[in-house]
Image (cartoon, rainbow, N blue to C red):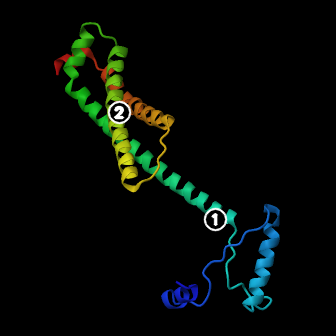
Amino acid sequence: MPFPVVQRQLKGITWLDDILCSAVSPEAIALAEAQITALLRERHRVRPGQEDDFNLRHPTEIAEARAAAQHTMTLLLGSVATVALLVGGIGIMNIMLVSVTERTREIGLRRAVGARERDILTQFLVEAVTVALLGGGSGLGLGLLGTYGIAAVAGWQILIRANVLVVAVGCAGAVGIGFGFYPAWRAARLDPIEALRR
């Protein structure tokens, strides 16, 4: 289709949307920009002192805008992940506190037959980390499944690095330790006589 037909009859405009230019070398970019600006001002009959009626965009500006958008997206995803970890950690702490309450007699019995505080602490910490790793592992599996599914449907190439997966599992374990410590400490500090009395 001839360009003037597309321009006037389909788009309804009488000017060019974009003109792509390239300089002969990176050093010549500034000179090329000045020459392009002067030529467009002359052709558009822009008087001295008037603002340009066109925009001249440099490739570095586009790259900087993309980098800024990517940085914003990274911060947004990081904040969403932080909230998700916090909510997951609170869930783990609540589960473990309920577990400590329901197993008070078991804790008292274990303490009565010789279990030390650190044994009880270790037991509940291991349980908290196990719950966190199971949740993190299932989330990781669903995430990978979704990623590969979307990539297969859309025909995209994907790259998933192993170190990212290790960090994800490590974060889940750290959340289990961080939020499981208080319930474990509370279980370890129970008085055996009071625990057996319940």
When the figure is inspected, residue 155 is found, relative to residue 194, above or below; the finding is below
Indicate the quadrant where residue 109 lies. top left
Query: Mark 1 vs mark 2: which is more N-terminal?
Result: 1
The answer to which of 16 and 194 lies nearer the viewer is 16
Specify few, some or many for label 2: CA neighbours under 10 Å numbering under 14, 14-19, or 20 or more.
many
Q: Write the residue at 32% across / 37% down.
A: 138
Residue 137 image point, x, y percent: 35, 35
What secondary structure is found at the residue carrying circle 1?
A: helix
When the figure is inspected, residue 140 is found, relative to residue 31, above or below; the finding is above
Residue 100 image point, x, y percent: 26, 26
Position of residue 181 in the picture relative to residue 56 (left or right) = left
| Viewer can see residue 189 | no
- Residue to which mark 1 is pinned: 62
Indicate the quadrant where residue 181 lies. top left
- Residue to which mark 2 is pinned: 132
When the figure is inspected, residue 42 is found, relative to residue 55, above or below; the finding is below
